[in-house]
Image (spheres, helix red, strand yellow):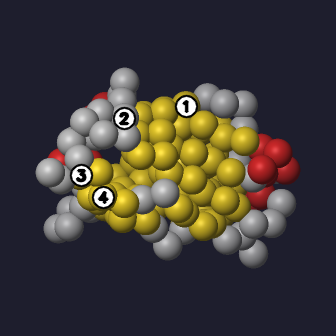
């Protein structure tokens, strides 16, 4: 069983930065996987923010391109989301996600709140 634990959320002013971390238990990083971050704002559906493959190939939502950077440290079983130039519309619960294509399995973390407000 894989467990994902997010950290790093909080309250930040517009224009500020935060770095989210997602630590994965188990041996998920030793097999082919796609790690990602999703977010869900109040009253809205959960949406993709960014994903990264084992090979380091990344995909971003248009709304965060140029501001957010996803990265991974396979030695630490951890994926990061560096968020810069934050806007109030970035306020949401951010969820870590892990997909294992070979087994068609998806795991979710419990989420971490990010609030951008002055």
Question: Circle 2 — which element?
Answer: loop
Answer yes or no: do the residues labelled 2 and 3 have beta carbons within 8 Å? no
Q: In this view, does 68 lie above or below 36?
A: above
**Mark 2 Cα within 10 Å, few/some/many (few <14, many 20+)?**
some
The residue where tag 1 is placed is 58
Q: Which residue is drawn at 82% across and 45% down?
A: 75
Sooner in the amino-acid sequence: mark 1 or mark 3: 1
Between marks 1 and 3, how big is the CA–CA gap? 25 Å
Nearer to us: label 1 or label 3: 3
Q: Residue at x 14, y 51 (%)?
A: 118
Between marks 4 and 1, how big is the CA–CA gap? 26 Å
Q: In this view, does 62 lie above or below 32?
A: above
For the N terminus, the quadrant is: bottom right
The residue where tag 3 is placed is 116
Quadrant position of residue 27? bottom right
Quadrant position of residue 99? bottom right
Residue 84 circle label: 2
Sooner in the amino-acid sequence: mark 1 or mark 2: 1
Between marks 4 and 3, how big is the CA–CA gap? 6 Å
The residue where tag 4 is placed is 11
Question: Circle 3 — which element?
Answer: strand
Between marks 4 and 2, how big is the CA–CA gap? 13 Å
């Amino acid at each position: 069983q894989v467990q994902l634990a997010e950290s790093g959320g909080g309250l930040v002013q517009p224009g500020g930065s935060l770095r989210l971390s997602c630590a994965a238990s188990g041996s998920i990083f030793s097999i082919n996987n796609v790690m990602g971050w999703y977010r869900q704002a109040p009253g809205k559906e959960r949406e993709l923010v960014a994903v990264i493959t084992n090979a380091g190939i990344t995909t971003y939502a248009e709304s965060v391109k140029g501001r957010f950077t996803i990265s991974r440290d396979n030695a630490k079983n951890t994926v990061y989301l560096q968020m810069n130039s934050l806007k109030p519309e970035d306020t949401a619960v951010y969820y870590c996600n892990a997909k294992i294509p070979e087994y068609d399995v998806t795991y979710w973390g419990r989420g971490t709140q990010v609030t951008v407000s002055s």
